[in-house]
Amino acid sequence: MMQNNFYITTPIYYPSGEPHMGHAYSSILADVFARFERNNNKKVFFLTGTDEHGLKIQSAAEKKGLPPLIYCDKISLIFKDLTKKLNLSNDDFIRTTEQRHHKSVSDLWNKLVKSGDIYLSKYKGWYSVSDEAYYNNDEISEKNGKKYSTFSGSEVEWVEEDSFFFKLSAWQQKLLDFYDNNKKFILPISRRNEVVNFVKSGLKDLSVSRTSFTWGIKVPENDKHVIYVWLDALTNYLSALNFPNTKDNLYKNFWPASLHVIGKDILRFHAIYWPAFLLAAKIKPPSRIFGHGWILSGDEKMSKSKGNILDPVEIIDKYGIDELRYYLMKEVSHGSDGSISLKSLTNCINSDLANNYGNLCQRIFSFVKNNCNSKVTKNNEVSESDIKLINETEKITKNLRDFMNDQNLNHYIKSVINISFLTNKYINDEEPWKLKKSNVIKMNNILHLSFEQIVKISILLNPIIPIATSKVLDALQVSPKLRNLSFLDGKKILPDKIIINDLKILFKKLDV
Ligand code: MSP
């Protein structure tokens, strides 16, 4: 894949219920990386979708008294609507019930049969329908006569049925070599260690077909078996690029994927099974799996089964989508869990968006409108405090691409907000309003530098709060061609003479 192309995916969501904040989090996170890389002048393909097969979905449909496909059509649409509500910039939305996906899964299956990695046997062991995952004996605990996975806490049942197996055990050493040769294949590093230790402790062959239900993609030439829903689901990342047509431009340009964004609960599937399937089928594995932490409500994972859900749609309607995006991205730190609440949402909006970035924009725009006839012209004088602000800003921006390359969004946001803080401080110290009569030239220079700072901050925050930052860049009449990170390489954005349009209030301060 050319380095200038960037293929990023979200997990595909189970339509077993309506979307919640955890889903919104995975999606927004991926969207921020997609938007950043577009601004970084890369050609981006951003994929999301729904994972519609398996017993979990079949049972959800039965509970509603609907045929599975009709049920999936309904709920998948809700997930698709959510992409609009979250302001996602996805290029495609894939459903695993689509024909293009069936073709791709069957082809991958055939490749695994051909390479000798699949054999027929009988599965005897624990299975969790909620996780759609198999568990070993040593991963099971018992409570009130019921068995649970110690890994996920989900209930498991004993399953015995004919099944095809994938020779995962044969890939143990090759996987370890692969992790060794690709040190950043799994991030954050703590997750990588978890996976490496698990693989080192020994891999068993993996059951990859089921015979006790029918809702899935049939094993080619053996329709008693449906393909294991995770083998089916993971393949979506290939299907959307028109695999198995490897001559297709999408496939040629975008495979291997640059980044699969996932939650830590589905790390094993992505960091162990997926590269093993691909290596066996002689397809290059993706470059990076980023496993984010969970959104917690109190100390617990927010999830449908726990009934502790904050509805993203309600929050967006009340507070705004930029506000929710910013809050989730800032609050849930790099790969760790984060507890969210309405109180901390309000504090975050007030401190960073209303008082810091919003205030910076508003104060300069309204001053220039009211006192300078909406025009600012700079001359070439540069004061010591100008140089200080420019240097401090450069020192911070130098690291930003590296932060994003490592999905370290938290450091990235803190750095950009710090530039906004420093710019507000510069304005407080320089007091341009006092120079209106005494030194108009200096006043203009201060205002011009403030606008340059505002443009940089807006471009840098654009992946996170696209609506507000676009309003600011529109008001400064910045051409769409310049709304990218070229300024980090020295490209000038604003002309010496700026004429501004009005800027309406960006973020309202909320009552605490
Ligand atoms: N269908 C599988 C993924 C297949 S990808 C080939 C699946 N679906 S899911 O709907 O259960 O979860 C999708 C994503 O949402 C996962 O990355 C999961 O981590 C994330 N979240 C679900 N609840 C979450 C939180 N409370 N917090 C953050 N994200 C969590 O797994």
Image (spheres, grey):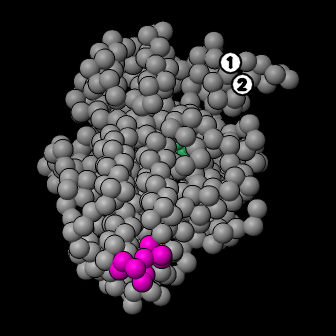
Around disc 2, counting alpha carbons within 10 Å, would you say few (fewer than 14), some (14 to 19), or many (20 or more)? many
Q: Give the percent coordinates (x, y) of residue 180.
A: 31, 17
Is residue 364 found left or right of 278 in the rendered image? right
How many numbered discs, if any? 2
Which portion, as a residue range, is magenta? 432-440
Q: Which residue carries the number 1 mark?
A: 140
Q: Quadrant of residue 177?
A: top left
Where residue 174 sits in the image (x, y, percent)? 30, 16
Residue indicated by mark 2: 148
- For the residues labelled 2 and 1, the Cα–Cα distance comes to 6 Å
Q: Where's ligand 1: which quadrant?
A: top right
Residue reaching furthest to the right = 144
State the image quarter where residue 432 is shown: bottom left
Query: Is residue 213 something one can see in this rendering?
Result: no
**Looking at the picture, how far across and down is residue 468, in whole percent?**
48, 70
Residue 54 is marked as: none
Question: Type of residue at label 2?
Answer: Tyr
Residue at 39 percent across and 86 percent down: it is: 372
Disc 1 residue type (three-letter): Ile
| Quadrant containing the N terminus in the rendered view | top left
Q: Residue at x 75, y 67 (%)?
A: 511
Specify whether residue 438 is painted magenta: yes
